Amino acid sequence: MQSQKFSVGNRLKSLAYAIAGIVEFIRQEHNARIHAVATVAVIIAGFVFRVSLPEAAILAIVTGGVWITEMLNTCVERMADLVYPEEHPLIKFIKDLAAGAVLVAAITAVVVGLFIFIPKLK
């Protein structure tokens, strides 16, 4: 298969598709809206507590990690439901494992947030 030449128009289309996917994800998924509220809260807390640039970068990384795992979890769940809509122990394990990845990312983000924000409360 021959690769296509670079095209700014095609890159802009890809960007538009990605943005549409994110918007639809937030519109359809309850957990995405929870993450959006938490993200806004972290951003506000960052300004209120005047986090340093490295602290802001760390908060951005762990917050992004939660978003990424939640989006991939949604992909896994939707794909599993499409491919095998009936209940199946292996599909259940796969979906539970993907959900567990989100939980690990969220716990990590909370712990990092506590490390950054608790000392600023003193």
Image (spheres, grey):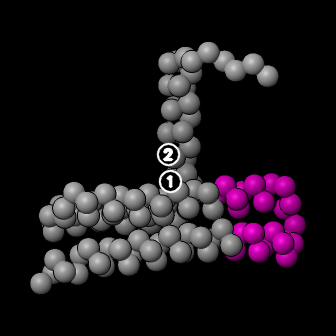
In this rendering, does residue 26 appear at all? yes
Return the residue found at the far bottom: 122
Q: Which residue is mark 1?
A: 26
* 37 to 14, vertically: above or below: below
Residue at x 81%, y 69% (from the top left corner): 91
* Magenta extent: 74-96
Around disc 2, counting alpha carbons within 10 Å, would you say few (fewer than 14), some (14 to 19), or many (20 or more)? Answer: few
Residue type, mark 2 in image: Val
Query: Residue 48: percent from the left, percent from the top?
Result: 15, 65
Q: Is residue 97 left or right of residue 104?
A: right
In this rendering, does residue 33 appear at all? no
Q: Report the quarter where the C terminus lies.
A: bottom left
> Mark number for residue 23?
2
Count all numbered tags in the image, as a single digit: 2
Residue at x 56%, y 30% (from the top left corner): 14
* 92 to 65, vertically: above or below: below
Q: Are marks 2 and 1 in contact (CB under 8 Å)?
A: yes
Q: Is residue 63 left or right of residue 21?
A: left
Q: Main secondary structure of the magenta part?
A: helix
Query: Residue 57: percent from the left, percent from the top?
Result: 31, 57
**In magenta segment, residue 75:** yes
Q: Is residue 73 left or right of residue 57?
A: right
Residue type, mark 1 in image: Ile
User: 67 and 34: which one is in front?
Assistant: 67
User: 107 and 91: which one is in front?
Assistant: 107
* 69 to 99, vertically: above or below: above
Q: Is residue 52 left or right of residue 26?
A: left
Measure the C-alpha gap from mark 2 to mark 1: 5 Å
